[in-house]
Image: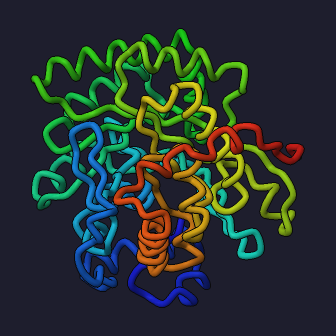
Amino acid sequence: MSALFGLGQALLLALDPERAHDLAVKTLELGIYPRAAGPDDPRLKRRLFGLDFPNPVGMAPGFDKNARVPRELLAMGFGFAEVGTLTPLPQAGNPRPRVFRSHADRAVINRLGFNNEGQVAALRRLQRRPGGIVGVNLGAGRDSRDRIADYVEGVKRMATVASYFAINISSPNTPGLRDLQAPRKLDQLLGKVQAARAAIGPKPPPLFVKLAPDLADADLPEVTRVIAANGVDGVIVSNTTLAREAFLDRAFARETGGLSGRPLFDRATRMLARVYLATQGKLPLIGVGGIDSPETALAKIEGGASLIQLYTGLVFEGPGLIGRVKRKLVEAMAGAKVESLAPFVGRRAEEWAEKKLPEVVV
């Protein structure tokens, strides 16, 4: 995938998406990127699960797959960054081409398949980084014989460098991975992961589970019950979708893989709101999927997100989106005469939960 950091937006959009992404990461490593103008407005602060976020806007995983630039991302103005997805062993992912862009639809499709250098390489990098909140997104190896064991191994290995863990069981690009969202399998996974966290010490990194936007409505109550019963700290909603609805670029829509960007927004926000209501607003949620404007960022919070993450929106909007989102949130708080975002979280959840989605085109 691509991101528009450091180099001109037009240049990166003219390149092959995966090459543009690699170049964007390299520019950050070289120190060529825009810095945040100054400290965040104190009203943007969020304290959740024992962590102090300077602002609620995070970098989603997938950009910094190998933990090469978390310091630089935080310096750009993100309140937190999530690296990965990391698997126990290095893996190349799926064959190229495997990333596709649609300018007309403001969307990306990827079938990368957890390409990364493995947890050991990321661990070495993260041991050298300065402060700031950096989450570690964990996945299972494509050819693993015991995928639950892969997550347990990741928790044990990365515990000293993770501000929080994100258990990614919702990528559509590793065959069979989403089967771990089934309640029985999910219960087994979380039981073993929580046992591994308990062995870390009295204050292990918080644990999040990342769900797919394609989860059936009928399955959601049991899935959220299992998550709550296992003492998970929060939920990330959502990953990319396999759904294809109405697209301007039909050739793009025929590509296989997970869809992100503007067409995902309604589906992901509807799922977010349903998780918020199913958990009675008691679990912090990270909302991700389709945020490409200050307005959609605020809408995601109103749908139930305590924190939000960007990625594909930056591909088309550039890094200025970070500051624009933060300014919008401050303006919203000032207009409502409140000193935090808490009153906005979930206030439109019922409306979003009932939203009708377009018919899916297969």
Residue 306, placed above or below residue 212? below
Residue at left offset 60%, top offset 67% = 295
Residue at left offset 71%, top offset 43% = 351
Q: Name which quarter of the figure residue 138 lies in.
A: top left
How many marks can you see?
0
Q: Is residue 121 left or right of residue 245?
A: left
Residue at left offset 89%, top offset 44% = 359
Q: Position of residue 158 (x, y in %)?
A: 21, 38
The N terminus sits in image quarter: bottom right
Along the line of sight, which residue is nearer the eye, 21 or 199?
A: 199
Q: Name which quarter of the figure residue 160 lies in.
A: top left
Q: Position of residue 5 (x, y in %)?
A: 42, 79
Extreme residue in the front direction: 337
Query: From this viewpoint, is residue 58 visible?
Result: no
Q: Is residue 16 left or right of residue 37?
A: right
Query: From this viewpoint, is residue 348 visible?
Result: yes
Q: Position of residue 81 (x, y in %)?
A: 33, 57
